[in-house]
Amino acid sequence: MKDISCKLLVIGAGPGGYVCAIRAGQLGIDTVIVEMAKPGGTCLNIGCIPSKALIHAAEEFDKIAHLASGRNALGITTTKPAIDLSQTIAWKDGIVGRLTGGVSGLLKRAKVKVVQGRARFRDGKTVEVETETGRQIIRAENVVIATGSVPVALPFLPFGGTVISSTEALSLSAVPDRLVVVGGGYIGLELGTAFAKMGAKVSIVEAQDRILPQYDAELTRPVSKRLKALGIEVMTGAKARGLAKSGGALLVEAEDGTEISLPADKILVTVGRRPVTQGWGLEELVLDMEGAFIRIDERCQTSMRGIYAIGDVTGEPMLAHRAMAQGEMVAEIVAGHKRAWDKRAIPAVCFTDPEIVSVGLAPDEAKKTGGETKLGLFPFLANGRAMTKQGEDGFVRVVARADNHLVLGIQAVGQGVSELAAAFGLAIEMGARLEDIAGTIHAHPTEGEAFQEAALKALGQELHI
Amino acid sequence: MGEHLIKMPDVGEGIAEAELVEWHVKVGDLVREDAVLAAVMTDKATVEIPSPVDGEVLWLGAEIGDVVAIGSPLIRLKVEGEDSVAPAGQDEKAAEPPARPKDIEAQADGAVKSSEAIVERQGKSAPPPRPPEPPQRPPVRTHLPSVARAEGERPIASPAVRLRAREAGIDLRQVPGSGPAGRITHEDLDVFFTHGRQVAKAPGLAQNNSVEHVKVIGLRRKIAEKMALAKSRIPHITYVEEIDVTALEELRAALNANKRSERPKLTLLPFLMRAMVKAIAEQPHLNAIYDDDAGIVHQHGGVHIGIATQTGSGLMVPVVKHAEARDLWECAAELNRLAEAAKAGLASREELSGSTITITSLGAMGGIVTTPVINYPEVAIVGVNKMVVRPVWDGSTFVPRKMMNLSSSFDHRIIDGWDAAVFIQRIKTLLETPAMIFVEA
């Protein structure tokens, strides 16, 4: 097979890699991207998108089930719903197919050459790819490592059989009767909630003293409340110990030290993700590492000239939009533009019920920066739109510097607040002050009004509370 | 709510227009009654325009450097209350009369360096314009605290500004932010591009390709126009002669040592002024205004000596009126008063006009020779150079003498070289034998 030479080689066509390649192609850079599976990476194939599809289906099912229970205030009656999960999954796969196909089309339009197969570095400028038709050598002036991350397995609970990762959870053919989720982070909660809504009896085992430990308790409280209402059993301070001998239960050491056996048809382990730093020839390179991650500078450059790394393989937060922004930046750097990472905030969203958004600094983090801070919190309880959506739980909270009112962080929890991430991110990225948000007309009636009111509250000028 | 129109005030008799040299407010500012809104400039004096009412600035009618006719709309304010005036453009009579100039101030705050008489005195700076006080009314959202970015703090700027700076190779930490909370705006970057750009210093010499565009306005424009007029119309003849001021300096030292305390300290200039008065008595056509368009030389009986004075904003020429009627001490006192007023920016238009002949002196900076430019439409200017001790051959030996050059220019259309030489020689005789200044021959 004839060797390929190019200016830019991207390894991994996840959100970071494919964005990088598309932008590079648009900039006229001769670009090759290597992907061993379908383009789109974890995000499109087995992460963000499929989980949102499943969550949506579960919500719809839950709504109807709630209406069918006859205890609703809306006066709607219906019959008890049923779900054919395999059809749901097929629908989800259709969406995934459309999106990955879309990415392929975009790569093609940007004149990016896609090589299917597993890449492995020979040296800093040469990569060999095992393709279906043989070995392909690619020589590149610049290489971008965008190999992503995979779910972490617990040594005493290896994946297989009843023990599944998020990947398998998104392709189950039937709703398990009893699902135990190990790990109360956002992935476990999102999926656990979805399966509970679809009728599974769900237990969540979290080793720390509360769920979503990276968020403050105020922000996670509405989620805990909803989990309880959904009948999900949350065990905090509890440690998974392994499979029961029978195989149909998870042994858990509860907070008080007692050992409990949780019957389970499926055990979903979501205890985090680790960067993919094996299997592609890291050992052929001399890259400085930062823990398990590849160390990068503000231009996503590794310790080797001409080798860049983006996305989950470079560290937290392991989020698709971070990888995309990095990918775009690196393509422009390779094109000779002056670029460096200068983002103010990377929004984080949990698609739990209700949803959580956090952009910028949380109140505690803001306090640690030294200066005085101002806080404004507006509950959806006082928001008309939230009432009409039956989503009065939650709030928007704004943290700002006390001296010049520069907004440092914005958090929200509530039904559908993920869409507010756009406004929150823009405010922080533009360097908004509380007055800027308070002085912007927010459409009525929307949940976004709570954002404006939170800013007004921080200024002591709240109107609707 | 109503509007209040402020027109360009009548800033002086016979003045039809004035140049806007400074805005103290911008659109959207809240101003209080008597707060200074703008500064305008007539021939030489700068006049501040105060606000007659409290209000919010809606519109500014001119840009800095514009020449605005007296009575033209200048500022529109939004004012509260029922007694507010009809908006501009309606009945002219309904509008308030033009604002009265609050006080007359020239814009100088620097030191006067022009003459020895002046350098020795400490001038007071012009009081800074009072900042507009915050209004008493409630919604004060626009007036919330804005704290400048502290040293080393991360700059606040929108992504577009950050990108533009990055591409231009500018470190935003070095760009001052004018926006709320010290946010760096595109305009701040523009300013930084044209003025403040500081490229990281590489060792060795580096090219500086910056070009600063400075608008010539206000006093500088007046000076430029006047100089161009003088040099393009007047064929200058410059005559330089050296003067032995040893005796004069002895006299001056003795007078200063024995003077009454209330009397001003004498510099050389009052002696020169008195000597010029004497010389002019014999050559009155040197003390004149030449109306070259009309073809008439106005020879003045009164000797009104302009004193070229360096101020913080540029050259000004306050005038000692009727030097022929002032004795040495009075000349000195008036000289000091005017120099101080000019330096403080308080000289009135009257004090800055009406000269018939001018003295220019760079004092200790005076050099050997200068080629003074005549203060158009006068016909003569006497320039004082630096006094130094030089060896002088007295016929048998070299003796140290205090020597000083006078570099003087004359309008050669009116003054022949001969007349110029006679005038300067007469002054030389008077200064070298100072008793003659005071005694009638």
Image (cartoon, coloured by chain):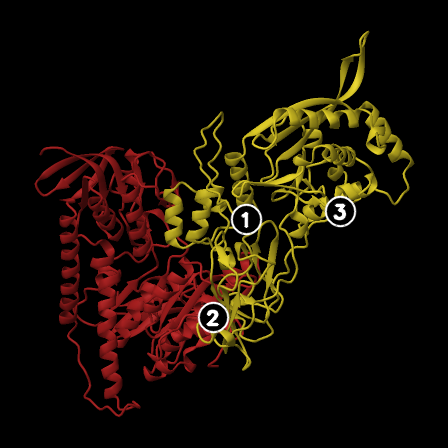
Chain colours: A red, B yellow
Can residue A206 be seen at all in this image of the molecule? no
- Labelled disc at residue A242: none
Amino acid found under the numbered disc labelled 3: Arg
From the top left corner, tell me how far across and down residue A344 is, in percent: 41, 55
SS state under label 1: helix
Is B116 rendered above or below residue A46? above
Amino acid found under the numbered disc labelled 1: Gly
Q: CA distance from mark 3 to mark 2?
A: 59 Å
From the top left corner, tell me how far across and down residue A239 is, in percent: 40, 63
Tell which of A293 and B434 is nearer to you: B434
Q: Quadrant of the N terminus of chain A?
A: top left
SS state under label 2: helix
Dot 2 crowding, Cα within 10 Å, few <14, some 14–19, many 20+: many
- Which of the 4 quarters of the picture holds residue A61? bottom left
Name the residue that disc number 1 marks: B218
Dot 3 crowding, Cα within 10 Å, few <14, some 14–19, many 20+: some
Is A374 rendered above or below residue B81? above
Name the residue that disc number 3 marks: B337
The reply to whether discs 1 and 2 touch (Cβ–Cβ < 8 Å) is no
Q: Of tags 3 and 2, which is closer to the observer?
A: 3
SS state under label 3: helix
Query: Disc 3 sits on a residue from what chain?
Result: B
- Labelled disc at residue A455: 2
Q: Say whether mark 1 and mark 3 are on the same chain.
A: yes
From the top left corner, tell me how far across and down residue B423 is, in percent: 70, 28
Query: Disc 2 sits on a residue from what chain?
Result: A
Tell which of A398 and A270 is nearer to you: A398
Query: Disc 1 sits on a residue from what chain?
Result: B
The residue at 57%/75% (across/down) is B137
